[in-house]
Image (cartoon, helix red, strand yellow):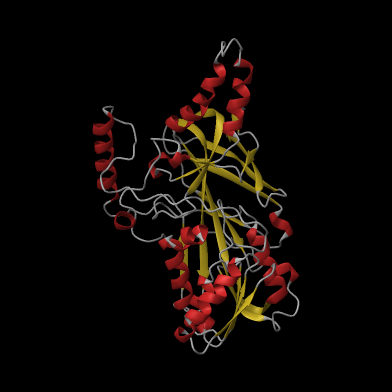
């Protein structure tokens, strides 16, 4: 229940899904709907509120029982709708669903869009149960990446091997393990909120059209990029986040996890280079982010970056996407979005540009960071108070200036591709 509470209390996530469903009545009124990985059943209930006649809430875990309890307790809210709970993995459904449905709804999204590999189950539902021309909510995912510079974060990871540099630990020399310790920490992606000011180039976006893309194409994902650097700096790695887009008949709604948008329980993610790249303004950095699916419902990630026109390059060790470091639990320097909702508004415009190829992911330039009212003033105030509290200017800490939000615990990984625990 705690994990479900964590997701339900993510106001950005829950309210955006509700907006996408309720404000597209032409897609739900009188229609049949399937909710894949229903969890608490919240998307099923939104669909019923929007006028769906029949809603299949597919949930493989024991949470399916609570979906039925909630449906019975709230049946007067949607008298014209019938919610049917299907307590089994989607791949094993036989006669529990009558024919095909008009709409699929799901929250199949993990860190960096694809962690947990739930999107594959979403696509399986599309292939088996969606009528031709049926709607998917969401129907598009945009994966964004951008280089970042964060000397404090890099220093933190480099110095975590300090214990293993002890040449006389009860008479034992531990120094042979120091390099291994460093590599282990660099194999962990960093999950936290990113200070937008640490990004040193315009983000690059790759679009995935869930209505057409194949399951097999998600087993290995290669994302090439070419960044024009905005200022002289050391590049310490690659940052990532995503937008989920709901293109309904009545309107389009975007759920954004960008660094300049209100925080979500997905946060953002960063992959660190062991050796930073020194670059000048105007130089181009090219490379590839590669995601290889594994049997742990996740991906192994590789990052390669090279200064264009030179032989200078750097890469990250093989990174386990399912083994992140949640930095806001471990570092006093973790960034907290100042003001969050009040300072940054709700969401960002969907990324656009380029011609979409429905048969494969589309590479294009991400939208620029919006000018958020109050952001600069709020961030300056936070820095001043943090510096006063620490006694050393320039150190980012979580000061008590009213901008700190209660941290949500990270969502536990699903136990099977058909279950949203």
Q: Position of residue 219 (x, y in %)?
A: 71, 53
Quarter of the view holding residue 122: bottom right
Q: Position of residue 285 (x, y in %)?
A: 55, 37
Q: Name the residue located 52 percent from the left edge and 86 percent from the top edge.
A: 29
Compared across the picture, whether 155 is left or right of 82 comes to left
Q: Position of residue 140 (x, y in %)?
A: 57, 64
Q: Is residue 235 above or below residue 62?
A: above
Residue 279 visible to an observer of this rendering: no
Looking at the figure, which quarter contains the C terminus? bottom right
Quarter of the view holding residue 344: bottom left
Q: Name the residue located 28 percent from the left edge and 55 percent from the top edge.
A: 373
User: Could you tell me how many numbered marks the image carries?
Assistant: 0
Q: Is residue 314 above or below residue 45?
A: above
Q: Name the residue located 43 percent from the left edge and 41 percent from the top edge.
A: 328
Outermost residue on the bottom side: it is 80
State the residue in front, 275 or 84: 84
State the residue in front, 287 or 331: 331
Q: Is residue 316 above or below residue 146?
A: above
Compared across the picture, whether 107 is left or right of 264 comes to right
Q: Position of residue 15 (x, y in %)?
A: 42, 67
Quarter of the view holding residue 360: bottom right
């Amino acid at each position: 229940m705690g994990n479900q509470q964590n997701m339900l209390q993510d106001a950005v996530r829950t309210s955006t899904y509700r907006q996408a469903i309720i404000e597209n009545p032409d897609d739900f009124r009188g229609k049949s709907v399937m909710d894949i990985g229903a969890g608490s059943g919240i998307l099923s209930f939104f669909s019923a509120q929007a006028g769906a006649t029949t809603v299949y809430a597919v949930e493989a875990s024991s949470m399916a029982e609570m979906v039925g309890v909630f449906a019975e307790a709230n049946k007067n809210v949607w008298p014209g709708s019938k919610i049917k709970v299907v307590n089994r993995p989607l791949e094993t459904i036989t006669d529990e669903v009558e024919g095909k449905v008009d709409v699929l709804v799901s929250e199949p999204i993990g860190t960096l869009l694809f962690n947990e590999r739930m999107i594959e189950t979403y696509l399986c539902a599309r292939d088996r149960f969606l009528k031709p021309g049926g709607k998917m909510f969401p129907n598009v995912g945009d994966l964004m990446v951008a280089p970042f510079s964060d000397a404090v974060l890099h220093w933190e990871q480099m110095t975590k091997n300090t214990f293993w540099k002890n040449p006389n630990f009860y008479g034992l020399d531990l120094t042979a393990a120091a390099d291994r310790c460093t590599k282990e920490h660099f194999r962990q992606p960093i999950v936290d909120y990113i200070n937008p000011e640490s990004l040193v180039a315009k983000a690059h976006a790759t679009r995935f059209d869930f209505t057409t893309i194949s399951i097999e194409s998600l087993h290995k994902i290669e994302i090439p990029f070419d960044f024009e650097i905005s200022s002289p700096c050391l590049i310490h790695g690659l940052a990532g986040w995503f937008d989920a887009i709901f293109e309904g008949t009545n309107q389009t709604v975007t759920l954004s996890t960008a660094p300049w948008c209100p925080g979500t329980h997905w946060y953002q993610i960063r992959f660190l280079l062991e050796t930073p790249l020194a670059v000048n303004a105007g130089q181009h950095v090219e490379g590839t982010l590669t995601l290889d699916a594994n049997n742990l419902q996740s991906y192994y990630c590789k990052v390669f970056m090279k200064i264009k026109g030179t032989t200078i390059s750097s890469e990250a060790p093989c990174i386990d996407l399912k083994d992140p470091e949640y930095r806001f639990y471990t570092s006093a320097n973790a960034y907290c979005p100042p003001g969050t909702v009040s300072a940054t508004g709700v969401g960002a415009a969907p990324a656009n540009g380029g011609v979409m190829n429905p048969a494969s992911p589309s590479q294009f330039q991400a939208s620029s960071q919006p000018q958020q009212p109050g952001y600069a003033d709020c961030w300056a105030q936070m820095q001043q108070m943090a510096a006063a509290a620490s006694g050393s200017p320039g150190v980012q800490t979580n000061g008590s200036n009213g901008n700190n939000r209660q941290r949500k615990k990270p969502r536990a990984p699903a136990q099977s591709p058909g279950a949203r625990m």
